[in-house]
Amino acid sequence: MNHNENPIRTARYHIGELVRHRVYPFRGAIFDVDPVFDNDEEWWLSIPEDIRPKKDQPFYHLLAENAEGPYIAYVSEQNLLPDESGEPVSHPNADEVFDGFADGHYIVARDLAN
């Protein structure tokens, strides 16, 4: 048995779910998932080394919001927690990406689900 193999993990969160960051004060709605890190090296190296996530885990694209307003975030699975607020995010692109909001999560647009 080879212990060096890293099987791709199944993503814990799904498109349309609300999550919040484990450390920083922001929350967001997931609109895309990468099975492993898929951003540029400069972005990854800009994260302080003591909190820099491993690359071999799912990364999530979020329609995010914080006290300053809406933005797009790219976050590792290890730094996310479920957002239990049940409230939609105040992001101008939410209506373009999702087909509505119900029961504490966004409804995935039909044309993106294919």
Image: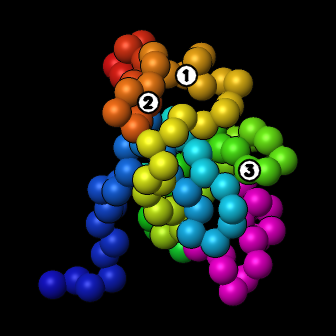
- Foreground residue among 56 and 5: 56
Q: Is residue 40 above or below residue 98?
A: below
Q: Bounds of the magenta span? A: 37-53
> Residue tagged by mark 3?
66
Q: Are marks 1 and 3 in contact (CB under 8 Å)?
A: no
Quadrant in the picture for the C terminus = top left
User: Any magenta on residue 75?
Assistant: no
> Residue tagged by mark 2?
106
Residue 49, position as x, y percentages in the image: 72, 83
Give how far apart the Cα atoms at labels 1 and 3 are.
19 Å
Label located before the other in sequence (3 or 2): 3
Q: Nearer the viewer, mark 1 or mark 3?
A: 3
Q: Is residue 15 left or right of residue 93?
A: left
Callout 3: 10 Å neighbours few (<14), some, many (20+)?
some
Q: Is residue 57 above or below residue 48?
A: above
Q: Is residue 20 above or below residue 5?
A: above
> Residue tagged by mark 1?
97
In the rendered structure, find residue 114 and report the number of the disc placed on it: none
